[in-house]
């Protein structure tokens, strides 16, 4: 693949890692768009690169700056667009669901209505979520019915249906990725894996919602970025691809592993709290399609991935302790 890639959500955990991977290909030029100012290497891996001449960043908000964004698309004419931008937290979506629908559906509708008519776009990759299925147990394939259980999940399901409609009616060159629980260095600090490492070091209790019984499928961010790039390059238009590890693990067992690594008592380091409304019991999905069609498979096991997070926290500890540890909602 060569040419130009436009990445929405460039400052997001997933967006920044995808950009870093894309920049390894010297034939690619990347433009990143996010609503927040560009951040430091603490959260942006690509900032460690010596040469960023093939990357440009624009601070633009999908909800406020759409005319400028559409002008940028028409002026730059990217061959590929990757969209990570979304209101993505589950629990807070109950408090202001309209914010989730504004970003994930209304602004997306404006964007897709524009790009579906631009012939220079060869592929549009949309990052969805397995939460559109609700609880995922057993063999959950890409054609599983929607059964969302939170406003966030409903907004993502609505977005997926909208995009599929534009693909059918106007030939939008759509490919969709749904990946399970992504983790790794530079993840938001309120997420369970970095939060567990940080709270143990600070002597703070780790809250286990519902006792940590929910089953998650943790997969390293670089494996996801590799899969997304493979989908963007070789994925069939109109297709959905799952990216997931070989097996799931309960949140409780995951935190227990982290405690063991840090020689901390699990019972002293954790406290059980009420489960969040609409929390699905499991996210275990089948990724056979990506493995057989694209030759993709995860390469970084959980233990090596946890090592990656631990090294990042050690390296940036003095900066990390000055960061907020809780989710901060921005409408």
Image (spheres, helix red, strand yellow):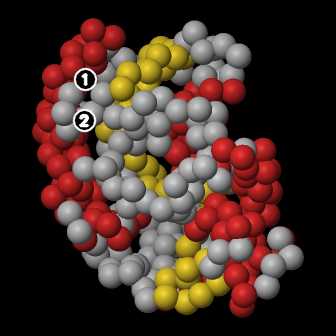
Q: Quadrant of residue 255?
A: bottom right
First in sequence: mark 2 vs mark 1: 2
Are the two marked residues, 2 and 1, in contact with CB atoms closer than 8 angstroms?
Answer: yes
Q: How far across and how far down the image is residue 38, in percent?
A: 48, 29
Q: Quadrant of residue 253?
A: bottom right
Crowding at mark 1 (Cα within 10 Å: few <14, some 14-19, many 20+): some
Q: Is residue 159 above or below residue 117?
A: below
Q: Secondary structure at mark 2?
A: loop
- Point 55% across, 73% down: residue: 216
Instruction: Give the residue furthest to the front.
Output: 322
Does 19 sit left or right of 275 as displayed?
A: right
Q: Is residue 15 above or below residue 256?
A: above
Residue at image mark 2: 62
Q: How far across and how far down the image is residue 310, in percent?
A: 77, 56
In space, the residues marked 2 and 1 are separated at their CA atoms by 8 Å
Front one among 40 and 292: 40
- Point 34% across, 34% down: residue: 35
Q: Do we see residue 256 in this rendering?
A: yes
Crowding at mark 2 (Cα within 10 Å: few <14, some 14-19, many 20+): many
- Point 24% across, 56% down: residue: 100
Q: Quadrant of residue 136?
A: bottom left
Q: How far across and how far down the image is residue 5, in percent?
A: 44, 22
- Point 47% across, 37% down: residue: 11
Front one among 268 and 113: 268
Checking the image for residue 69, the label placed there is 1
Does 13 sit left or right of 144 as displayed?
A: right
Q: Secondary structure at mark 1?
A: helix
Checking the image for residue 58, the label placed there is none
Instruction: Give the residue furthest to the right.
Output: 263
Image quarter of the N terminus: top right
Front one among 91 and 198: 198
């Amino acid at each position: 693949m060569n040419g130009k890639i436009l990445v929405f959500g460039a400052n997001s955990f997933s967006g920044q890692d995808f950009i870093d991977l894309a920049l390894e290909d010297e034939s690619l030029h990347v433009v990143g768009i996010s609503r927040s100012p560009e951040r430091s290497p603490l959260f942006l891996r690509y900032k460690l690169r010596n040469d960023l001449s093939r990357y440009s960043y624009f601070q633009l908000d999908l909800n406020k700056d759409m005319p400028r964004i559409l002008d940028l698309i028409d002026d730059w004419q990217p061959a590929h667009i990757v969209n990570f931008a979304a209101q993505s937290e589950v629990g807070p979506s109950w408090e202001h669901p309209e914010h989730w629908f504004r970003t994930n559906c209304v602004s997306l509708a404006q964007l897709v209505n524009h790009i579906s008519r631009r012939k220079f776009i060869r592929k549009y990759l949309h990052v969805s979520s397995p939460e559109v299925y609700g609880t995922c147990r057993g063999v959950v394939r890409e054609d599983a019915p929607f059964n969302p259980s939170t406003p966030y999940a409903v907004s993502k399901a609505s977005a997926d249906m909208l995009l599929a409609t534009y693909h059918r009616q106007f030939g939008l060159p759509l490919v969709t990725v749904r990946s399970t629980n992504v983790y790794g260095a530079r993840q938001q600090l309120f997420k369970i894996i970095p939060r567990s490492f940080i709270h143990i070091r600070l002597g703070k209790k780790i809250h286990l919602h519902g006792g940590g019984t929910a089953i998650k499928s943790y997969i390293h961010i670089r494996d996801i970025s590799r899969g997304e790039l493979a989908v963007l390059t070789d994925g069939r238009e109109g297709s959905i691809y799952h990216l997931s590890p070989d097996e799931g693990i309960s949140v409780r067992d995951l935190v227990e592993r982290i405690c063991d690594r840090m020689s901390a008592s699990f019972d002293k380091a954790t406290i059980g709290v009420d489960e969040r409304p609409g929390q699905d019991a499991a996210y275990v999905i089948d990724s056979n399609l990506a493995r057989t069609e694209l030759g993709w498979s995860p390469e970084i096991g959980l233990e090596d991935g946890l090592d990656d997070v631990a090294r990042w926290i050690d390296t940036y500890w003095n900066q990390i302790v000055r960061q907020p540890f809780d989710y901060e909602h921005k409408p």
